[in-house]
Amino acid sequence: MNRSEEDELKYTEDMICNNFSNYSAWHNRSLLLSNLLKRKVEGFVSKEKVLPDEYEFVHQAIFTDPDDQSGWFYHLWLLDQTVRVDSPQLVSSWPTPGSDLILLGDRCLDGCASSPFTRFYLDSRTFPLVLYFNQSVEGVNSSTITVDSELNTNKDLVWKPLSSCNSKAAQVWVTQLNLPDGNTHSSKVFPVEVSLGHSQGIISSSGFHYSNPFCFAFRVSLQLVETQPVEGLGKEIISWRDESFHNYNAHSQDSSPISSLYQLSIKNDNELTDFEWRAATIAKEIDHFRELLSLINCKIGKLTLARLLMAHDAMTCPPANKFSHSEEVLELYNDLMRLDPMHVQYYKDQHSLVLLQQVTSSWESLLSRCFHYSNSPSNRGSPMCLQLKNLSLSRLGSFDKLLWVQMLDLSHNELRSIEGLEALQLLSCLNLSNNILGSFTALEPIRQLKSLRALNISYNEIGAHSIDTTKYLCSSPLSHSVGSEWNHGQTVIDDDIKSYWEAYFILKGLNLTQFDIVGNAIVNEKFKSFLIKVLPGLKWLDGEQLH
Amino acid sequence: MGELAADKHVKYIISVEKKKDSFESVVMEHLRLNGAYWGLTTLDILGKLDAVDEEDVISWILKCQDESGGFAGNIGHDPHVLYTLSAVQVLALFDKLDILDADKVSNYVAGLQNGDGSFSGDIWGEVDTRFSYIAICCLSILQRLDKINVDKAVEYIVSCKNLDGGFGCTPGGESHSGQIFCCVGALAIAGALHHVDKDLLGWWLCERQVKSGGLNGRPEKLPDVCYSWWVLSSLIMIDRVHWINKDKLVKFILDCQDMENGGISDRPDDAVDVFHTYFGVAGLSLLEYPGLKPIDPAYALPVDVVNRIFFSKK
């Protein structure tokens, strides 16, 4: 017997009206509605018409008994349906549109007049082109993305998804462009034009195509000056102590490259359609939940209000007004930590994400955290270090705003995960000391950072835990995602690899010159000799020079 | 906080194994092989696997094998993947996987994959994501995953993903912690956890923790010690376990012990059984309770047993 879907929908309505504490009924309702909306069945063609009634319906459940969870997940689903933009969009890139980059080769120079935000140090013959989408996509390749420049032939470009395991989909994709020839006149400028959306192929996991033709350009020039070796990366030991860093004094001519990051809210036309009803719906929900909270101080009220305010801010243009509710949201999460201490770490993680959004929301705020790295104050030729230390961060985010970062200090936080950090393809120096990273597998994102030379993970908790919570989120022989080298016996499994397989998988293939690991339970003489075997290019281990 | 009465639990498990005429043994007769897995894995976690007669157990297990290659719950019963996995797991505990004809067992399991990637439990055809987990886990332990279409198996599991981030027994089935464990575990072993929305599912899972500190199976249900395994291991596999209060959960599990006669029950003051004893002890292992061997959240076997399977010199 085939009931019509509308009949089934009515049935769920009856069940819920009888007793709203019926999770099965809410689940079935969400499934039916989602199918009807997807197939655009008559009467369910537009979300704009359907969702308002559903919000009212679930309010009855939540506002009657805020502690009953039955309606919570349905409301979250409605919110997702209200804000979600189905088609993939480009959110950010490096190099940024309109930027003028100076790429410095191995022997970098001193006294450079240009802004440190336009100078990038590389010790390889290529530089990355990074595309950051709003969701995980497949099908990024030289047919769907055209890169027009003298530096490369487009069809030879290989695009890699930055994902763990063998997933063919990722939110962030990267390809390598050749550095200009070192013999070229050093002031020659090479324009690069990137276009996407001109042919179909980039597709999200839910089957929506990237369909917004977009083109951007940037310019690259190379400087290779043969002066005496100065603090090139990997030439001298990096010290993370405060004395090595000097406040960056902003000059007016610096404003262009970073502020272009904030003009990179690419005009996505889809975002503008339906904007009216989406914004109005969120605004109405905010009012409803403020009213609820004025009557009952409840957890679901505060949590939902925090989510609604963030959704509202994310939808707001222009960028100058973005995240105007951050302070209120941070306060809400602080309240929730007190109101619902059982889930304090969940609220802490959300708090960290909002804090990072706030910090990266304006270029003034970012700049206040940028420091020159230099062992001698007169040297202005060194990279810029973004300092995000001592912020009680338990989780990372806002990577789309941080693609330009080469040197990053995340020390003295409460990080147990660095999920998403693989997007920062320019990273060469990374400080994660004094956090709570619990295993090598938690460092999986680092495997994708091919430019990383100096890594500090001292004073974490590696080796201190019997249970590994990131074991299955990384590529390893236990999760059947490792390439043939392991499975076909090409890796000789000696006792060291057996004891330290996590460290082996994460570190092999990295080109580190400096590694700090003191203060982790796993460290002893045996482990240190294993490290030296796995990292043949290592020059300094825990501050000591190796031979 | 109370303490884990480890010795009492060891005595309880051994007594269950021996008293074949007890009520518990009789009602469990058809799934005795599952009971063996629960009891023996618990003993291993407590460091007391040597308290049983290994040869006795193994010879009985082999008598449960059917000519199809699959294992039944007891001698003379019908084969099913449920018992096949338990047999393979118990043999792994004793490091005796090599006495099996791995191809024969694997062919039985692989033969139960359907065209849409799903798995049936036995020749009678019932489909459930539990069987997807069982098949993938079993074949992985036997290192014969290439006998099935892993991509299709993953596709089917993903089709059972719900709008709340959880998973059901079949497409459209309501999210339930037990099914979630099976789907997340299967995806973990298959290297396909990128299909899980970790934040969305993580929040659904962490909200299983109720005031008493225990975990329930879905919204507005009572807490039960067995969810200390299913919810906890799922949270661990997606790296969101810090979203629950571990100390309160430890206390809940310890409160479910029978401190006099040994064993753990579903909630405080109820009758104990081997099933809940295993899930309580395994949960405590995942919570890094001192003195317990660490257990792998995907394979549900001690970590040293799993490492032995995958990292032995070939």
Image: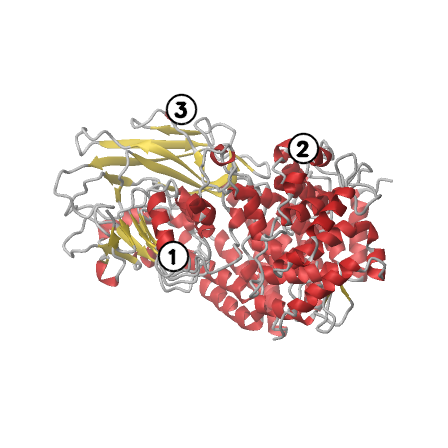
**Chain letter of the residue beneath label 3 in the structure image:** A
Secondary structure of residue under mark 3: helix
Q: Which quarter of the picture shows residue B105?
A: top right
Amino acid bearing label 1: Val
Per the image, the residue denoted by label 3 is A155
Within-10-Å neighbours for mark 1: few <14, some 14–19, many 20+: some
Q: Is residue A457 visible?
A: yes
Q: Quadrant of the N terminus of chain B?
A: bottom right
Secondary structure of residue under mark 2: helix
Cα distance between the residues tagged 1 and 2? 42 Å
Within-10-Å neighbours for mark 3: few <14, some 14–19, many 20+: few
- Left or right: A414 in relation to B145: left
- Percent from the top left, x then y, of residue A433? 36, 59
Name the residue furthest bottom.
B1
Amino acid bearing label 3: Lys
Per the image, the residue denoted by label 1 is A523
At a point 37% along the width and 52% down the height, the residue shown is A526
